[in-house]
Image (cartoon, rainbow, N blue to C red):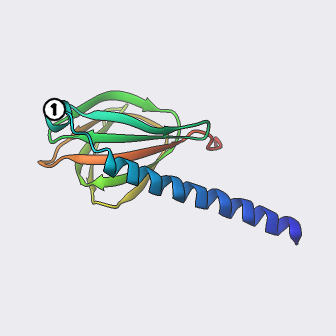
Amino acid sequence: MPRRSSRLLKTLATTLGLVALMAGGIAVAVLSRPATAAAEGTEATRKVVLQNERVRAQSNYYPAGASVPEHEHTSPRIVVVIEGGTLEVRDASGKVSTLSLKNGDIVWRPPEKHSITNAGSTPVHLVEIDVLDCPKR
């Protein structure tokens, strides 16, 4: 029994750590909303707000109409929506998916290669938390 309890405690501690990380990421992202002319214009901005050997948290701001060229995420990630809106995601095969995101949504995304366009009329602000040490399946 003690061995089972120990594993349960480790799992609980890891989960609570990730939740704390997400909450911290949200707070940092909200407090560090881009205020540059580029962020308020038509260019998307990205800012790494936390990075270590286990995770990388990045605040992404997409003004209406902004696009990000194709790029690759080699690790799965948690996406926390600070300001929702409509994003079009084009995968490596050319398939387009439309995401309607609401403030406070939390989404799991697998490793992928894609490009992004804010197809809506309002800015979208996300925090992406890459799980760098996620076991491969």
On screen, residue 86 versus residue 133, left or right, reads left
SS label for mark 1? helix
Decide: is 4 above or below 65: below
Q: Nearer the viewer, residue 137 or 28?
A: 28
Q: Which residue is drawn at 28% across and 60% down?
A: 103
For the residue carrying disc 1, how many other residues have a C-alpha within 10 Å: few (<14), some (14-19), or many (20+)?
Answer: few
Q: Where is residue 69 in the image (x, y as percent from the top left)?
A: 29, 27
Q: Position of residue 135 (x, y in %)?
A: 65, 43
Q: In which quarter of the image is residue 48?
A: top left
| Number of dots carrying numbers | 1
Q: In which quarter of the image is residue 128?
A: top left
Quadrant where the image shows the N terminus: bottom right
On screen, residue 33 versus residue 18, left or right, reads left
Q: Which amino acid does label 1 sit on?
A: Ala
Q: Which of 113 and 8 is in front in this view?
A: 8
Q: Where is residue 60 in the image (x, y as percent from the top left)?
A: 32, 40
Q: Which residue is drawn at 23% across and 38% down?
A: 117
Q: Which residue is drawn at 69% across and 60% down?
A: 11
Decide: is 30 above or below 10: above
Q: Nearer the viewer, residue 8 or 91?
A: 8
Quadrant where the image shows the C terminus: top right
Outermost residue toward the bottom? 1
Q: Where is residue 86 in the image (x, y as percent from the top left)?
A: 21, 50
Q: In which quarter of the image is residue 59?
A: top left
Residue bearing mark 1: 37
Q: Which residue is drawn at 11% across and 48% down?
A: 121
Decide: is 38 above or below 27: above
